[in-house]
Image (cartoon, rainbow, N blue to C red):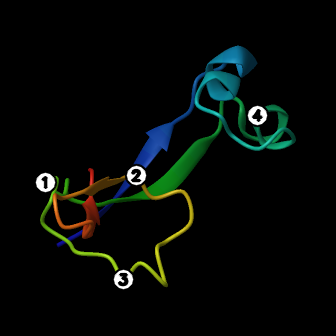
Amino acid sequence: MTATRQIMLPSERFRLEEINLPEELPAKLVGQTVRVEVLPEEPAMTRRFDLDNIPRGMPMLLDRDGVPWNDC
């Protein structure tokens, strides 16, 4: 279940830079109101990954058998 919300972004550019937005985005987005999709939190070790197809940048844990699971 997801929800869509509108949020107002900070008016200080450095705040957007702190959350690791791509280099060109903070200057474009500072102080704007944007629509975001809010996803539910996924508990760790509830989704198993295929070692040949792990989503890029996805934190993961390996169990004792070397099976990859989501970390967040």
Q: Is residue 19 above or below residue 50?
A: above
Q: Is residue 11 above or below residue 66?
A: above
Nearest-to-viewer mark from 3 and 2: 3
How many angstroms separate mark 1 from mark 4 (CA)?
Answer: 30 Å
Residue under circle 2? Answer: 59
Report x, y in % for residue 5.
36, 54
Amino acid on which disc 4 is placed: Pro
Report x, y in % for residue 37.
39, 62
Amino acid on which disc 3 is placed: Asp
Q: Residue at x 56, y 66 (%)?
A: 56
Instruction: Check whether the beta carbons of the residues at disc 2 and disc 4 lie within 8 A of each other.
Output: no
Q: Earlier in the sequence, mark 3 or mark 2?
A: 3
The front one of 3 and 63 is 63
How many angstroms separate mark 2 from mark 4 (CA)?
Answer: 25 Å
The front one of 28 and 33 is 28
Q: Earlier in the sequence, mark 2 or mark 4?
A: 4
Point out the image quarter for the N terminus.
Answer: bottom left
Residue under circle 3? Answer: 50
Nearest-to-viewer mark from 2 and 4: 2
Residue under circle 4? Answer: 26
Q: Residue at x 68, y 40 (%)?
A: 21
Residue under circle 1? Answer: 43
Task: Report the side of 13 relative to 45 (left or right).
Answer: right
Nearest-to-viewer mark from 1 and 3: 3
Q: Earlier in the sequence, mark 1 or mark 4?
A: 4
How many angstroms separate mark 2 from mark 1 (CA)?
Answer: 12 Å
